[in-house]
Image (tube, grey):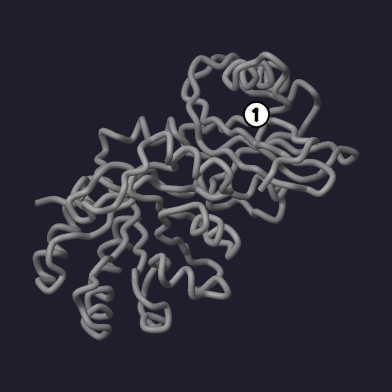
Amino acid sequence: MPLSSKQIHVMAGVLQDAEGRVLVTRRPEAAHQGGLWEFPGGKLEPGETPEQGLSRELAEELGIEIHTSRPLIRVHHDYGDRHILLDVRRVVAHAGTPHGREGQPLDWLAPNAMDPTRFPAADRPIIMALRLPQRLLITGADPRDPATLLARLRRVLEAGIRLVQLRAHELDDAAYRDLAGRAFPLCAAAGARLLLNRDPVAVADCPCHGLHLTAHRLAALQRRPGAPDELVGASCHNAAELSRAAALGLDYALLSPVKPTATHPQARALGWPGFAALVDPIPLPVYALGGLTTTDLSDAIGHGAQGVAAIRGLWPN
């Protein structure tokens, strides 16, 4: 989509306390989107880098000095009278205690406690990015050996994985539902979320935390599936599929392949520049997939990803 001539580049910062709560501020009633909560920041000035602009804005608004920050998500949003590019960075280290230097109310909220309707529309993908972890595990091995698969699942959950896509295309619907029923309590007990990669109708009665759609199922859908409180994402490989995921109101997407993979050797790798170019206009958290491991996490985040998704790179032998 071509950018409006009235595009406004806004920097926003995410500060978290020791309990994982995020600092939010309330907009003045007379301002655009007045009365709503937002993530602190402001307009990028000509000649400033994103890091410089964020540092200046948070010093002016909150009286803190930013030492280190890293990208979280960039959101393009058209309000009709203006096009906002919301460039969000997670503050890693800072000095000083945040306070409302301009008299604005402040609050600290857990991401899961944030009500998206109380934030501007452009801020809502930020909330989802804060709720999602940096690693998404896609199950591997042979799902026809459920005892071994579940033992491996326990190991990755103990190692800190908190988002799991149950991929088992080899199984029929009945066997898949049985496996999902056994995997769900393991994930729930660990505080992880289980996503089912299956026809939504076939797993409508399965316990889960959400759904993952293949690119084929994504193309066939007319509306977002699943319950309102479930996570729903999709596998994407090009700009059209990413746009479709955003248009359906999905919560996240996977984009692949970033690097050559053994499972799809014929697929042309996007590379990090290609990944970044496709992700930038999409108002969704997007995981990088394809030939990646946790060692690629920094590169992924630096090129606009929520994090990395992987089978071999995260699934134990």
Check disc 1 and report its element: helix, strand or loop: strand
Q: Residue 151 in the image: state x and y as whole percent.
A: 12, 61
Q: Residue 120 in the image: state x and y as whole percent.
A: 72, 47
Q: Residue 72 in the image: state x and y as whole percent.
A: 50, 36
Q: Measured along the vertical axis of the image, is residue 244 above or below residue 51?
A: below
Residue shown at 37% from the left, 42% from the top: 270
The residue sitting at the right extreme is 30
Q: Measured along the vertical axis of the image, is residue 177 above or below residue 10?
A: below
In the drawing, does residue 225 fall left or right of residue 76? left
Residue shown at 84% from the left, 44% from the top: 81
Q: Quadrant of residue 213?
A: bottom left
Q: Quadrant of residue 53?
A: top right
Residue shown at 68% from the left, 14% from the top: 47
Q: Residue 167 in the image: state x and y as whole percent.
A: 26, 66
Dot 1 amino acid type: Met
Q: Which residue is mark 1?
A: 11
Residue shown at 69% from the left, 40% from the top: 38
- 27, 297: nearer the viewer: 297
- 7, 306: nearer the viewer: 7
In the drawing, does residue 115 fall left or right of residue 255? right
- 307, 102: nearer the viewer: 307
